[in-house]
Every structure is written in structure tokens, then in C-alpha cells.
Image (cartoon, grey):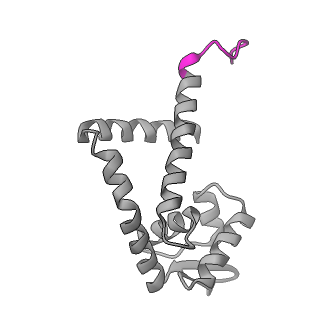
């Protein structure tokens, strides 16, 4: 650990750029999503649409690094919209299992269509090699944070 907070300008610049980029990305995506859909809803639907098995709310909270309360809130909204199914775990009655519904798949697909122009706009100025390089770095960075 450094005594002087200004002693590692690369780390400060990196974290600042990543935080600013995240804020810009969240803002643009949130504005482009279909009316009523929050970014957290899209992220959850996108995750569930790529799963072959159900997940418990506790597993989802851990995957998304959220509190159980925040996960319960998000899942409750998605269930009210009919985008997910929450059922008892037949092997352990204390647990529940979550899966995406057909309506959830359709809502996720609609959201992807609405945000695709943003991806295309941002990615158009970057080469595939630079994108792959950046993706590798971001995965390593995320792993270091965990």
C-alpha cells in the first residue's frame, strides 16, 4: 500500500476511466431500453436466457454481487411482469428456483434490438483485435478484483 495517494497515477487513471465509462454505458443503455425496463432487469434476463438450468435467488445474488434483498426486489419485479418463473425447489422446500419465461425471452430480445445500435456505434471505430485485447484485459482485471 502506498503512503501517498498520488504515488500510482496509472492505477488512479485506470479506475477513473473505467468508472466514467461504466457511468456513460449505463446511461446510454438505460435510455435505450424499452419503456419500463431497467438495466438490472435486462442484465438478469440476459443471464437467465443463456442458462440451461434454474438458479436459486441466493445463487443469483452471489453471481451478481448483490444483497439478497436487492435480488429479491429485482426478481419480484420480473415475476410481476411475467418475465420469470419462481417455483419451490422440490428437493428442499426452503429454497426457490428461478427461470426465464417465454415472455422474458421476448422482452430480452426486444431489449437487445433496442440497444444494438449503441453497440454498433461504439464498436464501429474499434478493430476486432483491439476489442479482443480489451476483453482479455477486462476479464483479468475483474478476476483480480474478485
Query: Which residue is located at x 64 percent, y 62 percent?
Result: 61
Query: Which residue is located at x 35 percent, y 46 percent?
Result: 122
Quadrant hosting residue 7:
top right
Query: Which residue is located at x 39 percent, y 73 percent?
Result: 109
Identify which residue, 13 or 60, lies in the foreground. Answer: 13
Quadrant into which the C terminus falls: top right
Report if residue 99 lies within the magenta region. no
Report if residue 9 lies within the magenta region. yes
Residue 80 x, y percent position in the rendering: 63, 84
> Magenta part of the protein: which range?
1-10
Most frequent secondary structure within the magenta stretch: loop
Identify which residue, 143 or 13, lies in the foreground. Answer: 13
Q: Is residue 146 above or below residue 112?
A: above
Quadrant into which the N terminus falls: top right
Query: Which residue is located at x 64 percent, y 77 percent?
Result: 77
Quadrant hosting residue 63:
bottom right
Identify which residue, 118 or 69, lies in the foreground. Answer: 118
Total numbered circles: 0
Amino acid at each position: 500500500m502506498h503512503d501517498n495517494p498520488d504515488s500510482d497515477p496509472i492505477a488512479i487513471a485506470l479506475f477513473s476511466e473505467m468508472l466514467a465509462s461504466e457511468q456513460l454505458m449505463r446511461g446510454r443503455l438505460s435510455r435505450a431500453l424499452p419503456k419500463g425496463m431497467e438495466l438490472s432487469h435486462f442484465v438478469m434476463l440476459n443471464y437467465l436466457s443463456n442458462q440451461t438450468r434454474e438458479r436459486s435467488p441466493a445463487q443469483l445474488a452471489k453471481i451478481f454481487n448483490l444483497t439478497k434483498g436487492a435480488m429479491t426486489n429485482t426478481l419480484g419485479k420480473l415475476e410481476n411482469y411475467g418475465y420469470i418463473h419462481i417455483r419451490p425447489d422440490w428437493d428442499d422446500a426452503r429454497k426457490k428456483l428461478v427461470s426465464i419465461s417465454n415472455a422474458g425471452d421476448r422482452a430480452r430480445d426486444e431489449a437487445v434490438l433496442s440497444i444494438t445500435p449503441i453497440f454498433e456505434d461504439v464498436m464501429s471505430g474499434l478493430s476486432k483485435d483491439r476489442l479482443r485485447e480489451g476483453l482479455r484485459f477486462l476479464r483479468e482485471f475483474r478476476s483480480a478484483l474478485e
